[in-house]
Amino acid sequence: MDSESFSLALRSPLSTAAGSIRRRDGFLVRVDRDGVIGLGESTPLPGWTESHEECEATLAATQDPESMLAETDETGRSRRPAARHGVELAVADAEARVAGKSLAAFLSDGAIAETVPVNATVGDGSVDATVEATCEAVDGGFSALKVKVGARDPDVDAARLRAVREAAGDGVELRADANGAWDVETATRMLDVAAELDFSYVEQPLDADDVEGHAELRGRGVGVALDESLATVGPARILASDAADVLVCKPMALGGPIRTLDVAYQASERGVDAVVTTTIDAVVARVGAVHVAAALPERLSCGLATGSMLADDLALDPAPVEGGRVRVPAGPGLAGDTFSALRERS
């Protein structure tokens, strides 16, 4: 096994309630399975995963991929999810290539999707900028939009949500993402606004550790989705507490494609939906996430339309967004021979 570092700038900073994201620094991971090279990606994002330094040290110290994949903390979560993601994705890619199957077909026992619906992300901005981004996304064929909120005064965010609904029209699914910015009083008020505007869910309205608070927010006419909470308290506690209507499953934060599918299946058994999203990853991890979404039994619009946020990438994207959907690569592993040059680097 070996790894290689990379650094990719965003076209423009993505402002969220948790701060501004300006670049993505990570590692390509390669695993050899009897001469077949599997490719993975570890792109940490503190708040969701370990730090870049911790990820680098974990990959450098890993001699045996299987032993590293077996390591979990007392709650069953990975101690270094980004590092684990890169290794698990690389192993799965190699094994799928040996089997002559696409990664989605390798991961799933059932039918897989040929295309996956995706949502557009509308970043924090003024009302006018938010409307402009909404119109651009709808004109581009997106039927689902996620609006970043929580960084501004609640009155301003409420005005932004109303403007988005008016600009998007009734036929577009709308979601809001607060990144844990609100207290209970503000969250209650904003969920009522979202329900009035027929938003499908509000993501992470409270602090990630406040499982009980999220459980109490449910049932107000709009779904409660949890994202950061999966990284801090874990899916098992969230599901046991009936704290979410939707789990936002980031393979990079959960520790790999197989682990993400396991979480999604556990959620489905309890009547909780799962949405697969990226952490604004490079192309290898994005394609891996597309395969995970294609392997789910139920497919909501997923947060996979993030490649355009990067100013550059590791390779051409074999799963570009077209008309609000992504076509799942059909070749063996991640995408057939698309990433051959990345596999051969030393």
Image (cartoon, rainbow, N blue to C red):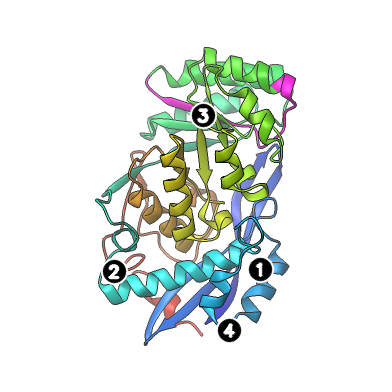
Label 1 Cα crowd, 10 Å radius (few <14 / some 14-19 / many 20+):
many
Name which residue type carries label 2. Pro
Label located before the other in sequence (3 or 2) = 3
Labelled disc at residue 332: 2
Alpha carbon distance from label 3 to label 4: 42 Å
Quadrant of residue 268 within the rendered picture = top left
Residue designated by label 3? 175
172 in magenta? yes
Alpha carbon distance from label 4 to label 1: 14 Å
Camera-nearest residue between 344 and 212: 212
Name which residue type carries label 3. Arg
**Magenta segment:** 171-186
Mark nearest the camera among 2 and 4 is 4
Labelled disc at residue 63: 4
Secondary structure, mark 3, is strand
Alpha carbon distance from label 3 to label 2: 34 Å
Residue designated by label 1? 55
Q: Where is residue 29 in the image (x, y as percent from the top left)?
A: 52, 74
Residue at position x 46%, y 56% from top? 286
Label located before the other in sequence (3 or 1) = 1
Label located before the other in sequence (2 or 4) = 4
Name which residue type carries label 1. Cys
Q: Position of residue 203 (x, y in %)?
A: 58, 33
Are the residues at dot 2 and dot 4 in contact (C-beta closer than 8 Å)? no
Secondary structure, mark 2, is loop
Q: Where is residue 63 in the image (x, y as percent from the top left)?
A: 58, 84
Residue at position x 60%, y 58% from top? 76
Secondary structure, mark 4, is loop
Label located before the other in sequence (3 or 4) = 4
Q: Where is residue 246 in the image (x, y as percent from the top left)?
A: 50, 35
